[in-house]
Image: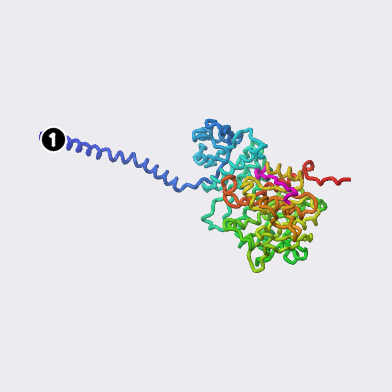
Amino acid sequence: MLEPIKMFGILRSKSFGNLFKTVNRILPQLRTYVSPALNQMLQLQQTEICADPPSRGLVLGVYTDEDDKVDPGILTPSAWRYNVQKTAGRMLEVLRMSGPMPKRGEARILFAVEPEKIPYYSAVAIVGLGKECLGYNSYEVLDEQKEAIRRSVARACMDLAYLNTDKIEVENCGHAESAAEGAALGIWAYQELKETKRRITVPSIDLYTHRDEPCDIEGWRIGLQKAAAQNLTRQLQEMPSNLLTPTAFAQTVVEVLCKSGVNVEVKVEGWAEAQSMHSFLSVGKASCEQPIFLELSYYGTSAEDRPIVLVGQGVTYDAGGLCLKELQELVHMRGDMTGAAVVVAACRAIAGLRLPVNIRGLIPLCENVIGCNSFRPGDVTKAMNGKSIKVEGTDHEDVLVLADALLYAQNFCPKFIVDIGTTSGMMRNALDEAACGVFTNSEILWQQIKHASMHTGDRVWRFPLWKYYTKNVTRGGSSDVQNYGVGRGGRPCKAAAFLREFVPCGQWMHIDATNVMVTDGKNFEYIRKGMAGRPTRTLVEFIAQTICKDTAPKLNPKSS
């Protein structure tokens, strides 16, 4: 048994000896062959490490049937031309191999699809636009094509921004205005108070054009103006209330609007007292910050033409007064000046678009906090028209602020009045984030703003202004009206009925934006979590539509 083992050891020793000789012979040749390959690999790794992130991105669209997972998709004309001329068909092949086509509100990022060693667009985002036949949906009261463009383009731009992209070019996707809105709204973020190194990259955006295609640069410009207006509203809403006091708000408005050709008059507390605006002044008595009344003027046509009056509620912080709000509500009460912010932003957009219309903006600014001079439940104050108002709850101060401004608006003999405020938290229970509540005494105004909201995707819904609610706020025995009224429910309707008591004549519309003040960032891809800036774009579109002579609201003819 020992002999075979011995023989095996001898054979193994000879084999290893031959192996070592062979390795020693070919090792120099192996080193000569490996060194260039190894050096090349290291150079590639070093290039990848030092390479700049994608600096230029492109957003293109694809139509697809979302119910069909194997739908190959149809590229938009701009996307098809880029696919054929720049990538030789490779982009569409890669897109189809990457999985099902993106749906509405989705984007797929493709890298280096161009054959060049250094591609012009290092990242291309393909966005889902749904079916080609999308349009107005009467059940949703929405233009689904435009909304799909906004949602998908915004998602693509946000994804590209996370890659530190410096510039993004966006094709019109069938509607340049909606594409511009989605892009500009999607990349915006409030980060003024952050360190520079912690801020999100905000790339520049531009319209992707080709010499062989029509270029809707005007639609793109209009979309950017509307989006910039909503972003201005969001910026004002997000600013902490200790930084955006009534005085600071007034200073900001002067800086923003005077550059745009809108005149701003700042009226102080003494002026409001001379005007007998006791309802407005009673709200801000407890605060160290003096109340301010802003009057904005824009003349886009003959000075003799009657203006449209916009009234914005400007409570820069609403603690509820002695009827203190709960903590979860107080967190967002810096946004109780949403109405004022919307009016300011709308005026800037109207001036930027040079709309041929006269606008007068009225903004009462104050704080509703607790102090030794707070107004109290049971107090009675008087408005400009002499009506007595019983304060049944200090946390329902919104209507008190707006009442005097509505009365002051009559001095301008307006075509109609639109007021925007956050007058009832119960709007959240009624509509959630889906739409603003609208109350109006004019069917024409309602149809106008409904049509405008259909185009902007920022929808509105009409609530009743029945006498039932008027009785609920006027049945008190010791005063003409009460700021809360009797009954357990219908709070939004009662707030509107209260305001109607201070609109003696003419067409008027009240927009309650309480429920759309804040968003969770999930329902609308083009608005990040936080303050939403709604309904700014709808208001701008509404005013633009009223300019058309065929559809502009007209006063009811006097009965003979």
Quadrant in which the C terminus is drawn: top right
**Which quadrant of the view contains residue 312?**
bottom right
Q: Callout 1 environment at 10 Å: few (<14), some (14 to 19), or many (20+)?
A: few
Q: Which residues are magenta?
A: 455-469
Q: Residue at x 22, y 37 (%)?
A: 19
Most foreground residue, 49 or 272: 272
Where is mark 1, residue-wise? Answer: 5
Question: Which quadrant of the view contains residue 454?
Answer: top right
Question: Is residue 459 covered in magenta?
Answer: yes
Residue situated in front as seen by the camera: 379 or 213:
379
Estimate the x, y position of residue 39 in percent, counting from the top left.
Answer: 38, 43
The N terminus is located in which quarter?
top left
Residue 187 is one of the magenta-drawn residues: no
Q: Amino acid at mark 1?
A: Ile
Please name whichever residue, 211 or 393, is drawn nearer the observer in this view of the structure.
Answer: 393
Q: Tell me the SS state at disc 1.
A: helix
Rendered position, 94 above or below 45: above
Up/down of 356 relative to 139, above or below: below
Residue 481 appears in the picture as rendered: yes
Q: Is residue 296 left or right of residue 560?
A: left
